[in-house]
């Protein structure tokens, strides 16, 4: 009986079976940390969206919540009630949909980096975090 060969086979099976589990746990951990580091979790405590608001939709947008970049994974909707933010579904864990009213956005600052124009806002009073979105998205609705 080749015990070494059985051990190698068992190790290979454990690695192949364990990789998806470990990867899934790491993925969940990263999303959890991002939601806390960005301030998304604190925003959700105050501005969790109960329903999809009306307005103009912009899919697969880039933006910042706090210091965390959400590159090409934000679905943004701007309308009379405010700015709605949702992450695309594979990244949605620990990031509930938000509806931030216009009245909660203050201190707008236009920023330009090469050809990208963005607007940065303080969110909440007192400030919870910051939100930075493409200028074209914000200008789609003038409150």
Image (cartoon, rainbow, N blue to C red):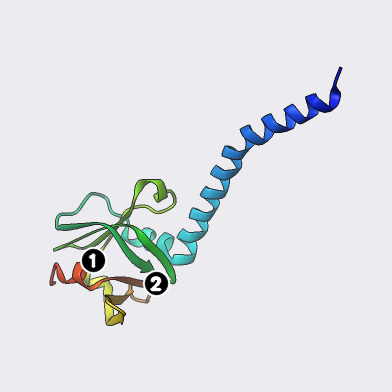
Q: Is residue 92 left or right of residue 30?
A: left
Q: Is residue 124 left or right of residue 34?
A: left
Precedes in sequence: disc 2 or disc 1: 1
Residue designated by label 2? 129
**Residue 128 position by quadrant:** bottom left
Q: Nearer the viewer, residue 6 or 50?
A: 6
Tell me the residue at 27%/73% (across/down): 105
Tell me the residue at 67%/29% (across/down): 13
- In the image, residue 61 sits, relative to residue 105, either above or below, namely above
Q: Secondary structure at mark 1?
A: loop
- What whole-number distance in Å separates the C-alpha atoms at marks 2 and 1? 14 Å
Disc number at residue 80? Answer: none
| Position of the N terminus by quadrant | top right
**Place of residue 115 in the rendered image (x, y in percent of width and height, measured from the top left):** 27, 77
Q: Nearer the viewer, residue 102 or 20?
A: 20
Tell me the residue at 16%/72% (across/down): 139
């Amino acid at each position: 009986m080749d015990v070494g060969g059985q051990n190698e086979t068992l190790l290979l099976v454990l690695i192949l079976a364990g990789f998806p589990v470990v990867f899934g746990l790491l993925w969940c951990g990263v999303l959890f940390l991002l939601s806390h580091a960005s301030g998304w979790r604190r925003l959700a405590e105050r501005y969790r969206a109960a329903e999809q608001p009306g307005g103009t939709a912009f899919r697969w947008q880039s933006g910042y919540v706090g210091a965390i970049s959400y590159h090409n994974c934000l679905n943004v909707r701007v309308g009379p009630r405010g700015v709605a933010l949702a992450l695309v579904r594979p990244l949605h864990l620990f990031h509930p949909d938000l509806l931030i009213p216009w009245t909660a956005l203050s201190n707008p600052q236009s920023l330009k980096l090469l050809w990208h124009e963005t607007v940065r806002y303080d969110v909440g009073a007192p400030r919870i975090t910051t939100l930075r979105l493409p200028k074209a998205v914000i200008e789609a609705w003038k409150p």
